[in-house]
Image: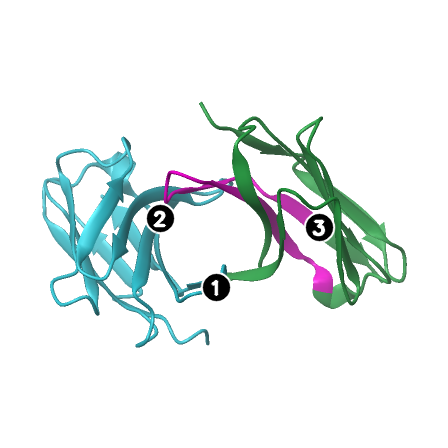
Amino acid sequence: GEDVEQSLFLSVREGDSSVINCTYTDSSSTYLYWYKQEPGAGLQLLTYIFSNMDMKQDQRLTVLLNKKDKHLSLRIADTQTGDSAIYFCAESTSGTYKYIFGTGTRLKVLA
Amino acid sequence: DTGVSQDPRHKITKRGQNVTFRCDPISEHNRLYWYRQTLGQGPEFLTYFQNEAQLEKSRLLSDRFSAERPKGSFSTLEIQRTEQGDSAMYLCASRGLGETQYFGPGTRLLVL
């Protein structure tokens, strides 16, 4: 079945780059997403990438997709304390309406 | 505030009771999703509506769970005969024509 895996924790210093990784199993994924969840708040879509793309950049965020290895990463440049949150990777597949989310990576930014 | 509201925000109930949650999506969005999120996990897909039609249900959705979207606007999720394992955050999301799902704040359910 479909599965999306992420490492649980990442700690970086303010101003450094953060790289959050995700692997997925469904080779027919069409879109892959990164969501952010802050304490006590709902999920917020940060960015997404279509499966025929390798890279997408949006201001401080860079998404890299390696479809062969089924690996997705989110790079946050110049990480700020306000970036501390849980980041979820998710995928959707054509032919189904459901989205599969990973377990989330808790990013802690140290001042 | 994403524009998606959920009610109630918190619910405490005793095992065996029925509970109903409501989601009001962004008004022009025809797509609506329900998810369940337990501590330390990502959201798990429960069901999807396009307008009033329920087009997909997860195998996680046992026969104690039912969802409706009678007029293609708000949606309700009912859990009958609640069990302690139903304790979770229940999230609703709506989506228009694009790829972005807008999540509500969730309803936190505690079954005693």
Q: Residue at x 86, y 63 (%)?
A: A78
Amino acid at the residue labelled 2: Tyr
Can you tell which of label 3 and label 2 is closer to the viewer? Answer: 2
x, y percentage for residue B89?
A: 36, 51
Mark 3: which secondary structure? strand
x, y percentage for residue B37?
A: 40, 46
Amino acid at the residue labelled 3: Leu
Splitting the image into 4 quarters, where does residue B68 fall? Answer: bottom left
* Location of mark 2 (residue): B35
Chain part drawn in magenta: A83-106
For this orientation, the residue located farthest to the top is A1
Please say whether residue A105 is one of the residues in the magenta stretch. Answer: yes
Q: Nearer the viewer, residue B103 or B28?
A: B28
Disc marking residue B98: 1
x, y percentage for residue A73?
A: 73, 43
Mark 1: which secondary structure? loop
